[in-house]
Image (tube, grey):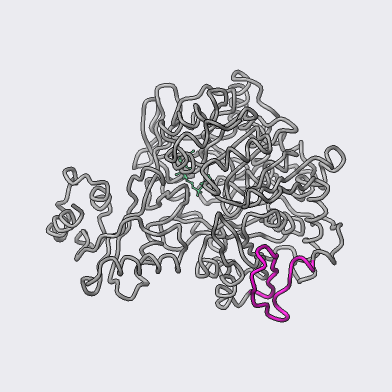
C-alpha cells in the first residue's frame, strides 16, 4: 500500500482516521499469516491494553526471509561494511541470510532455548548481530539487545529484569582505532545473573577470553555443525517479539515490549512509505542495532520489504570524517538515514571531507533521534543531498515501534527542522498542562497520541502498572510522548524536545536520575543533581551539580573519578560534560530539587531564574551562580 502523491496521502490519512481497522487490515493482509486474523483491534487507553490482529498467527522471519526466497534469493539482504576500510565488504543474500538464521535458530534450540524464553544479545555491529536477532524471532524467543557500549552493570540489570537464559556476545569489538572487550564485560555482568545458563561467543577480534566449561560455547563451531533449515515457530500476533530497554524519568530503565504482528505491519509499512523504497535500492541506516532505530529500520523494516540494508561496523570519523561518504559511493547507496548529532559533528570537521565525494547515487536522506536544527538541515541538504534529495526528519520513539510524524520522501512538502505531518494511522493531539486539548494552528503543547497504531508499546516487561503510569496516566485516555511540540500555521509539527526529566545526548536517551544514581555511587559524593544543557554537537550535554563529603582538594582528580564511576555504572555515553562542585542544591521546602533553576544556570541564563520564592534557602542559588561563572 504505497502512497503515490500528496492527494493520495491526504486520502489515505482520512481513511486511516475514519476507518482505522479497515485501513490496517488491508495492509496486514499483504503479509504471510499461518492463520489469518479476524479481529483487527481491541483497545483501551484508560486501563491500558492494546491488541492488534489478535487471533492471527505468523512468524516475522517468514516474512523477512522465506517470503523472498522465491523472488529474490540471490539479491543482497545485508551488506556488511567492516570497521577497517581496507577489509572487503561481505554481502549476505536472502538465501544465505535465511540459512544462517536457521543455523543459529538450531544452535539456540540445542542450548535449551524455547519459545517465550528471553535471550540477551550484546554484540558489535557485525552481521551475526542481525542473525542473532532473527534467530530468536524464528524460534519465538524474546530478544533483548543491549547496546555494545553499555557497562557490565547495565547489562546485568537488563538481564536480571527479564531473567534471560542465554546471552550472545563476541570475544571483542573494534570501533575506529579502539579495541573493546565484550566477553570480559559479559563475564563481569553475569557474575550477578543467576538466570544465565549459556553464553554463545562469536569470534571477532581473536582476543584471548576465558571460556567456562559447560556454560560458554563458540558460535562458529556450533554454527558449522547446525542444520540450515529450521521451521519457524508459530506465534500469536500478540506474543512478545522483543524487549528493548530505554530510559525514563526514574532511575531504572524500562523494558519496552513489542509484539509480533503489529510491529511487523507497522515497521514494514512505514519503511516503504517514508523512504519510498523501490525494489533493488541500497539503503544505509547508520544506527546501531542496539537501539530501536536499528531494530526497526536496519533489520526488520528493510528485510520485510526485501530491501538491501547496509550494516556498518565502524564510526563516522574513522579513518577520517569522509567514511560515510566513501561507503555511499562504494555501495551506491540510494537512501541514507542518520542522526543529527552525526550530521553536526561531520559538518564541524570541514567540507573537504564531503565536497570531493561522488554522492550521485543518493535519492533520499533521513534523520532521526533528536531535532534537526536548521543549520544542520541546510548542510545536509546542500553538501550531502546537493539539493536533490528530500530529507525525511522522522519523529518517533522506542515506544512507538516505528515512524510517527515524518515527511513521505518526495511527496510531503518540506520545512527545515519540522517533522511535518503525521503518517497514516497516527492521530497526534497537543494538550496543555491540565490535559486540555489545544486546538487550531500556531500553537505549542505537550504531544500526545489519541488512537492506537500497530507499533505501539504493549507493556513494560514485568510491570504493566509502570507502563500505564508512565504513558497513560499523565493525560487520561491519551498516550503521552514526553515531548513538547509546536504546530505551526500550516498544521506542520515541530518537536521541541523532552518536557520530562529525560535528556537526549547525541540522540541517546538518558534519564537525569540514572546519571545521578551513578554519580552518587562514588563514595566521596553526598548528593548530585543532573540536567541537560544545549550542546552544539550533541544537541544536549550533561551538566552535573555535585555535593562532595569534603570539598575536593584536587578538583580535576575528583572529576576524573566521577567520570570513571559513571562509565563503570552506565557506560561512556552517560559521562557528564560539565561537573560543578557545589555545597548545596536549590530545594523547595518539601525537599524537591528545583531543576528549572539548575537548567537555567547550566544554560548560562543567570538573569531569568523565574520564581525562586518557594526555595528553602535562596542563598544556595547565588552560590551556584558564582561557582558557574
Ligand atoms: C525521543 C525518543 C526514534 C528512534 C531514536 C530515538 C527524540 C526522536 C526525533 C526527531 C525531534 C526526536 C524525542 C523522542 N526524537 N526523533 N525527528 N525530532 N526529536 O528513540 O531513544 O526512544 O528517543 O527522541 O524526544 O521522544 P528514543
* Residue 478 can be seen, yes or no: no
Q: Is residue 401 left or right of residue 617?
A: right
Q: Is residue 197 magenta?
A: yes
Q: Is residue 133 left or right of residue 441?
A: right
**Residue lying at 53% horizontally and 62% vertically, measured from the top left:** 463
**Residue lying at 35% horizontally and 72% vertically, measured from the top left:** 522
Q: Where is residue 364 drawn, in percent x and y? A: 60, 30
**Residue lying at 52% horizontally and 21% vertically, measured from the top left:** 413
Q: Where is residue 274 drawn, in percent x and y? A: 61, 32
The quadrant the N terminus occupies is top right
Between residues 628 and 383, which one lies in front from this camera angle? 383
Between residues 89 and 373, which one lies in front from this camera angle? 89
Region rendered in magenta? 196-222
Q: Is residue 399 above or below residue 254?
A: above
Between residues 241 and 391, which one lies in front from this camera angle? 391
Q: Is residue 19 left or right of residue 451?
A: right
Quarter assignment of residue 203? bottom right
Q: Where is residue 142 drawn, in percent x and y? A: 67, 60
Quarter assignment of residue 185? bottom right
* Residue 277 can be seen, yes or no: yes
Amino acid at each position: 500500500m504505497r502512497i503515490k502523491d500528496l492527494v493520495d496521502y491526504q486520502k489515505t490519512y482520512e481513511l486511516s482516521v475514519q476507518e482505522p481497522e479497515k485501513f490496517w487490515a488491508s495492509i496486514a493482509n499483504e503479509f504471510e499469516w499461518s492463520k489469518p486474523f479476524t479481529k483487527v483491534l481491541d483497545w483501551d487507553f484508560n486501563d491500558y491494553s492494546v491488541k492488534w490482529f489478535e487471533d492471527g498467527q505468523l512468524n516475522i522471519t517468514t516474512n523477512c526471509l522465506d517470503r523472498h526466497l522465491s523472488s529474490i534469493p540471490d539479491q543482497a539482504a545485508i551488506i556488511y561494511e567492516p570497521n577497517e576500510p581496507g577489509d572487503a565488504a561481505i554481502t549476505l543474500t536472502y538465501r544465505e541470510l535465511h540459512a544462517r538464521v536457521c543455523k543459529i535458530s538450531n544452535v539456540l534450540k540445542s542450548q535449551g532455548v524455547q519459545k517465550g524464553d528471553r535471550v540477551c544479545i550484546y554484540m558489535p555491529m557485525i552481521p551475526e548481530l542481525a542473525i542473532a536477532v532473527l534467530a530468536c524471532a524464528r524460534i519465538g524467543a524474546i530478544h533483548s539487545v543491549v547496546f555494545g557500549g553499555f557497562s557490565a552493570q547495565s547489562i546485568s540489570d537488563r538481564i536480571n529484569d527479564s531473567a534471560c537464559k542465554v546471552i550472545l556476545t563476541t570475544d571483542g569489538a573494534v570501533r575506529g582505532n579502539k579495541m573493546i572487550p565484550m566477553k570480559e564485560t559479559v563475564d563481569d555482568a553475569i557474575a550477578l545473573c543467576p538466570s544465565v545458563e549459556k553464553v554463545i561467543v562469536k569470534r571477532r577480534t581473536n582476543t584471548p577470553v576465558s571460556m567456562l566449561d559447560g556454560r560458554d560455547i563458540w558460535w562458529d563451531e556450533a554454527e558449522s555443525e547446525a542444520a540450515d533449515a529450521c521451521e519457524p515457530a508459530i506465534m500469536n500476533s500478540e506474543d512478545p517479539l522483543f524487549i528493548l530497554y530505554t530510559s525514563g524519568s526514574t532511575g531504572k530503565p524500562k523494558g519496552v515490549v513489542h509484539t509480533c504482528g503489529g510491529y511487523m505491519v507497522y515497521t514494514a509499512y512505514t519503511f516503504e512509505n517514508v523512504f519510498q523504497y523501490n525494489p533493488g535500492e541500497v539503503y544505509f541506516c547508520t544506527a546501531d542495532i542496539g537501539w530501536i532505530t536499528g531494530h526497526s529500520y536496519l533489520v526488520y523494516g528493510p528485510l520485510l520489504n526485501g530491501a538491501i540494508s547496509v550494516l556498518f561496523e565502524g564510526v563516522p570519523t574513522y579513518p577520517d570524517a569522509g567514511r560515510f561518504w566513501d561507503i555511499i559511493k562504494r555501495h551506491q547507496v540510494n537512501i541514507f538515514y542518520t542522526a543529527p548529532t552525526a550530521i553536526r559533528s561531520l559538518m564541524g570537521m570541514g567540507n573537504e571531507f564531503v565536497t570531493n565525494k561522488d554522492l550521485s547515487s543518493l535519492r533520499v536522506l533521513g534523520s532521526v533521534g533528536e531535532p534537526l536544527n536548521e543549520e544542520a538541515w541546510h548542510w545536509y541538504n546542500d553538501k550531502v543531498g546537493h539539493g536533490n534529495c528530500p530529507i525525511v526528519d522522522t519523529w518517533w520513539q522506542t515506544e512507538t515501534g516505528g515512524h510517527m510524524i515524518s515527511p513521505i520522501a518526495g511527496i510531503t512538502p518540506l520545512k527545515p527542522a519540522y517533522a511535518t505531518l503525521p503518517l497514516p494511522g497516527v492521530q497526534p493531539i497537543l494538550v496543555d498542562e491540565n490535559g486540555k486539548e489545544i486546538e487550531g494552528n500556531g500553537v505549542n503543547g505537550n504531544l500526545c497520541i489519541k488512537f492506537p497504531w500497530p507499533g505501539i508499546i504493549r507493556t513494560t516487561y514485568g510491570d504493566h502498572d509502570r507502563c500505564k503510569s508512565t504513558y497513560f496516566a499523565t493525560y487520561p485516555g491519551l498516550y503521552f510522548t514526553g515531548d513538547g511540540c509546536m504546530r505551526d500555521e500550516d498544521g506542520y509539527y515541530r518537536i521541541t524536545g523532552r518536557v520530562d526529566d529525560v535528556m537526549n545526548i547525541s540522540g541517546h536517551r538518558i534519564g537525569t536520575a540514572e546519571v545521578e544514581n551513578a554519580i552518587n555511587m562514588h563514595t566521596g559524593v553526598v548528593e548530585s543533581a543532573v540536567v541537560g544543557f544545549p550542546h552544539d554537537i550533541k544537541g544536549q550535554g550533561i551538566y552535573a551539580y555535585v555535593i562532595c563529603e569534603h570539598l575536593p582538594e584536587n578538583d580535576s582528580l575528583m572529576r576524573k573519578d566521577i567520570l570513571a564511576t559513571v562509565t563503570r555504572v552506565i557506560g561512556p555515553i552517560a559521562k557528564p560534560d560539565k561537573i560543578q562542585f557545589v555545597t548545596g542544591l536549590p530545594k523547595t521546602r518539601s525537599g524537591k530539587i528545583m531543576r528549572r533553576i539548575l537548567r537555567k544556570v547550566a544554560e548560562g541564563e543567570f538573569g531569568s531564574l523565574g520564581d525562586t520564592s518557594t526555595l528553602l534557602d535562596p542563598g544556595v542559588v547565588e552560590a551556584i551562580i558564582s561557582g558557574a561563572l
